[in-house]
């Protein structure tokens, strides 16, 4: 999930830059002021029973995260905020003939592939501005991490998730506080994504529970990610060809159409319809870049975890050592 520093420096040049940080600060502050202690909500006889049930589940997930996954919890997810609709809107842009996202750079956290807005209108304006010359994706965001700068609250938007998805979300966001590499979204999101997936699987399977359905869901997601990765590679090959832009534009459209036909031919293998809605949505370079950021490198972290005997502290220590290396060296070591 996106990382937001929140109440950060606004002493940066340019009206658009100042405006971005101002809305980030205002949005973060509004969440902090609206917080209510989760324990109070649970104890309140007027609270919605379903809200209470999910808050108790989050309490248990936090205990499991700390005791079994060795994740730092502290004061995070101990408070609750009611929100109306999506929390954030993320804007991702990629050049018309590139499958790599345009980096958006910030103080302290470095560059990322996305920029988040608390107001949909602000995100729409940015998407329209970038869309003149780029492929753009604007997507709703359910959660983000402040990397321990603030005690992130539980949001009402979390409570619509089923148990597996909620566990994955909580563990993913907590993982960002273990290791975070400024400027390397692929490393950060793949690491947190693996921790979220593996942690949720173990949570569901604790005390002899049945996590087989979730494991099958992860296998389908992996197959779908690999499928999209193959097509992303074909797009990259096209963009590298010495042909004119008009021809590339036509071939690009044909490749996306062929990708959809390929999905239909392999639908049963790729989740049995689970991704029908995703495939029906518009595809462009920005969307392909964002999916790649979150999914492509999860298998590398899975192999490392297995090689270390599925020992969480040893795994975090190894990832921490990789995090301080230059980017190219990090990925080279993974593949040795």
Image (spheres, rainbow, N blue to C red):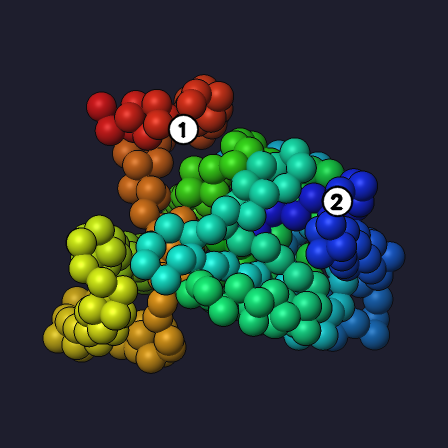
Helix or strand or loop: what does disc 2 sit on?
A: loop
Q: Nearer the viewer, mark 1 or mark 2?
A: 2
Q: Which residue is at the front of the view, 151 or 260? A: 260
| Residue at the left extreme of this rendering | 265
Question: In this rendering, would 266 be left or right of 32?
Answer: left
Which residue is depicted at the point 68% across and 73% down?
A: 121
Name the quadrant containing residue 264.
Answer: bottom left
Which residue is depicted at the point 20% across and 69% down?
A: 247
Residue for badge 1: 327
Q: Which residue is at the front of the view, 247 or 209? A: 247
Mark 1 touches mark 2? (CB < 8 Å)? no
Q: Position of residue 85 (x, y in %)?
A: 66, 74
Tell me: residue 139, above or below residue 208.
below
Tell me: residue 33, above or below residue 52.
above
Tell me: residue 73, above or below residue 121.
above
Q: Position of residue 228 (x, y in %)?
A: 26, 60
Cα–Cα span, label 1 and label 2: 29 Å
Question: In this rendering, would 16 be left or right of 158?
Answer: right
Residue for badge 2: 13
């Amino acid at each position: 999930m996106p990382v937001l520093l929140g109440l950060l420096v606004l002493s940066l040049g340019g009206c658009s830059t100042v405006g971005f940080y101002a809305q980030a600060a205002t949005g973060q502050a509004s969440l902090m002021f609206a917080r209510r202690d989760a324990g109070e909500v649970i104890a309140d006889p007027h609270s919605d029973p379903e809200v209470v049930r999910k808050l108790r589940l989050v309490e248990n997930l936090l205990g499991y995260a700390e005791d079994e996954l060795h994740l730092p919890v502290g004061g995070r997810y101990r408070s609750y905020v009611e929100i109306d609709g999506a929390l954030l809107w993320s804007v991702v842009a990629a050049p018309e003939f590139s499958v790599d996202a345009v980096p958006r750079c910030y103080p302290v956290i470095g560059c990322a592939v996305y920029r988040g807005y608390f107001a949909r209108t602000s995100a729409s304006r940015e998407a329209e501005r970038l869309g003149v010359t780029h492929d753009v994706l604007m997507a709703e965001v359910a959660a983000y991490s402040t990397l321990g700068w603030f005690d992130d609250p539980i949001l009402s938007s979390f409570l619509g998730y089923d148990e597996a998805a909620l566990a994955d979300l909580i563990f993913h966001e907590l993982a960002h506080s273990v290791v975070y590499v400024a400027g390397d979204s692929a490393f950060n999101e793949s690491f947190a994504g693996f921790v979220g997936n593996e942690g949720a699987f173990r949570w569901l399977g604790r005390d002899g529970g049945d996590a087989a359905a979730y494991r099958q869901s992860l296998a389908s997601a992996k197959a779908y990610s690999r499928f999209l990765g193959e097509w992303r590679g074909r797009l990259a090959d096209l963009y590298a060809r010495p042909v004119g832009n008009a021809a590339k534009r036509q071939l690009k459209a044909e490749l996306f159409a062929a990708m959809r036909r390929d999905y239909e031919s392999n639908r049963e293998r790729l989740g049995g319809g689970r991704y029908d809605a995703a495939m029906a949505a518009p595809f462009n370079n920005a969307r392909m870049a964002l999916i790649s950021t979150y999914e492509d490198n999860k298998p590398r972290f899975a192999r490392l975890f297995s090689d270390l005997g599925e020992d969480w502290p040893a795994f975090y220590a190894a990832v921490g050592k990789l995090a301080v290396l230059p980017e190219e060296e990090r990925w080279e070591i993974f593949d040795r």
